[in-house]
Image: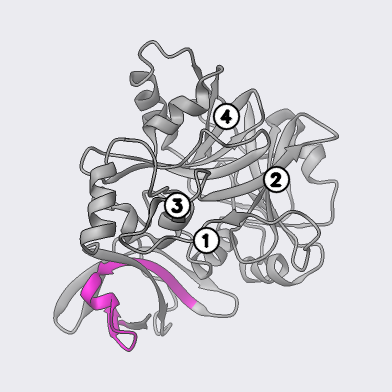
């Protein structure tokens, strides 16, 4: 994959770059950025231009992706988006992608550093299918706006997750999550409504050379990765490969089961595990949100063990300071530990609760 160039938003006053140097960790006030994103009329602009982007073109692109992934994509209309997963033969999550189709191209965006493996897998699965794949990371960039209180635009549509032993008619033959979108008026690109963060949220895809003028013309406050992580954790939105691992199955991650998995569609790799867990069993672990007591001013690092009594029951994914909630984290823990709402966990000496 082409490594994305440093974002134009890094030139803004107060910008502190992430370790990778491609986007900003914050712009001088990480807690203030969170609050502005969730409470002010102008909202916030999140720089997510480090995400990897793959494009798929060709008439059979949606049918082809439908056959490879967990989502029902054949009925996705132009200027609509969704989410989908690629699973291993044993049902473990290998890739998570946000999807958008503009009528000619299907856009897939995934976590930084994950695009190369995704593109390689898709290339191997082409066979004689008349689709073309491209790495668009160097040319295009993704940004996300919040608009607290806005309600005039079409909202995302989510189908309810059916109970085990459901009848086929209980789940429509459409994507389980549909995010409406449209072309941009002033420049090339598109916008896509999402259900992230708990307020009106919209993604914006633009050419990198157009990003500065297009993005900085509004009143939204720039916000960095610290603020994004805090708000997505509060909204129970996982990051693939950070809040998940090589053992993760879809049923362990409730937001993905609701938005990225269709439980009644044609065969795809790993489908047998999805069906078995849904109808016959329970996942061995759960992704949960933890509230830490803050006795250590530094949130625990990724991979820090989570203990219950004298037993290790899980690990921390992302942990960060939230402007209202204090220290919060997403963690993967054993199902039995997650079942007790009053459980008190230990995370590197800090007490934590669900």
Comes first in the chain, label 4 or label 3: 4
Number of the front mark, 4 or 3: 3
Marker disc for residue 106: 4
Q: Tell which residue pokes out farthest to the bottom in this image.
A: 342
Number of the front mark, 2 or 1: 1
Number of the front mark, 4 or 2: 4
Distance from the alpha carbon under mark 4 to that under mark 3: 28 Å
Q: Nearer the viewer, residue 280 or 180?
A: 280
Distance from the alpha carbon under mark 4 to that under mark 2: 27 Å
Distance from the alpha carbon under mark 4 to that under mark 1: 26 Å
The region drawn magenta spans: 327-350
Instruction: Kindly identify which residue carries mark 1.
Output: 229
Considering only vertical position in the picture, is 226 above or below 131?
A: below
Residue at (60, 58) in percent of width and height: 195
Q: Tell which residue pokes out farthest to the left in this image.
A: 310
| Residue 34 lies in quadrant | bottom right
User: Would you say the residues marked 3 and 2 are in contact, meaning their CB atoms lie under 8 Å apart?
Assistant: no
Residue at (66, 63) in percent of width and height: 28
Instruction: Kindly identify which residue carries mark 3.
Output: 169
Crowding around mark 3 (Cα neighbors within 10 Å: few <14, some 14 to 19, many 20+) is few
Residue 221 shows up from this direction: yes
Comes first in the chain, label 2 or label 1: 2
Considering only vertical position in the picture, is 172 above or below 213?
A: below
């Amino acid at each position: 994959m082409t490594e994305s160039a440093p974002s134009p938003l890094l030139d803004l006053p107060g910008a502190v770059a992430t370790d990778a140097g491609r986007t900003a960790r914050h712009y001088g006030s990480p807690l203030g950025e969170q609050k502005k994103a969730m409470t002010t009329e102008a909202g916030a602009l999140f720089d997510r231009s480090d995400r990897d982007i793959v494009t798929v073109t060709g008439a059979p692109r949606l049918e082809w992706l439908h056959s490879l992934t967990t989502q029902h994509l054949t009925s996705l209309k132009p200027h609509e988006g969704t989410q989908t997963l690629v699973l291993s033969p044993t049902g473990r999550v290998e890739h998570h992608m946000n999807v958008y189709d503009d009528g000619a191209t299907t856009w897939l965006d995934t976590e930084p550093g994950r695009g190369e493996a995704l593109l390689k897998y898709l290339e191997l699965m082409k066979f004689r299918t008349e689709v073309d794949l491209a790495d668009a990371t160097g040319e295009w960039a993704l940004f996300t706006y919040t608009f607290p209180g806005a309600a005039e635009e079409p909202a995302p549509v989510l189908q309810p997750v059916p109970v085990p032993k459901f009848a086929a008619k209980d789940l429509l033959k459409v994507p389980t999550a549909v995010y409406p979108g449209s072309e941009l008026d002033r420049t090339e690109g598109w916008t896509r409504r999402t259900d992230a963060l708990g307020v009106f949220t919209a993604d914006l895809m633009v050419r990198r050379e157009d990003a500065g003028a297009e993005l900085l013309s509004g009143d939204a406050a720039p916000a960095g990765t610290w603020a994004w992580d805090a708000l997505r954790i509060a909204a129970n939105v996982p990051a693939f490969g950070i809040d998940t691992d090589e053992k993760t199955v879809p049923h362990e991650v409730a937001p993905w089961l609701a938005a990225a998995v269709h439980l009644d569609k044609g065969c795809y790799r790993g489908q047998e595990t999805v069906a078995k867990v849904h109808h016959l069993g329970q996942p061995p672990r759960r992704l949960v949100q933890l509230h830490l007591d803050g006795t250590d001013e530094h949130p625990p690092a990724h991979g820090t063990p989570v203990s219950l009594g004298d037993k290790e029951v899980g690990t921390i994914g992302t942990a960060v300071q939230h402007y209202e909630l204090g220290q919060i984290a997403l963690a993967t823990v054993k199902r039995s530990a997650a079942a007790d709402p009053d459980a008190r966990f230990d995370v590197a000496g800090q007490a934590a609760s669900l």
